[in-house]
Image (cartoon, rainbow, N blue to C red):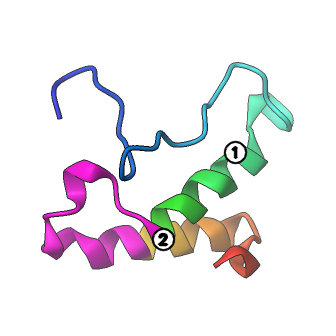
Amino acid sequence: RRRGEAFTFHGRRPPEMGDQGEGPAGFARARHAAFLELMSSELPDGYATQEVNHLTLAYFAVAGLSLLRELDRV
């Protein structure tokens, strides 16, 4: 991945994080949950070959969904 390029997940881009928010201070809860759900099922192309990081990324995806009370998505 070159500097300034967006992450892709097997050719797909993650959900866009626009300026419009859904909650206080512009926090787009549904978009964050969709991104974490995607992270829990597919790794970004740049991390697919780094097996050491798989468990760490899975942990943070599940922890983030737990904070958002969206664990039923995985």
Instruction: Please name the residue shown 52% across and 43% down the image.
Output: 14
Q: Is residue 64 above or below residue 21?
A: below
Quarter of the image that includes the C terminus:
bottom right
Image: magenta residue range: 41-58
Please state the total of marks drawn on the protein image.
Answer: 2
What crowding class fits label 1: few (fewer than 14 Cα within 10 Å), some (14-19), or many (20 or more)? some
> Residue beneath label 1, please?
31
Q: Amino acid at mark 2?
A: Ser
Q: Secondary structure at mark 1?
A: helix
Q: On the rendered structure, is 26 left or right of 67?
A: right
Q: On the rendered structure, is 41 left or right of 33?
A: left
Q: Which mark is residue 41?
A: 2
Q: Nearer the viewer, residue 6 or 55?
A: 6
Q: Nearer the viewer, residue 74 or 71?
A: 74
What crowding class fits label 2: few (fewer than 14 Cα within 10 Å), some (14-19), or many (20 or more)? few
Q: Position of residue 21 (x, y in %)?
A: 79, 29
Q: Position of residue 25 (x, y in %)?
A: 77, 29
- Judge whether residue 43 is colored magenta: yes
Mark closest to the chain's N terminus, 1 or 2? 1
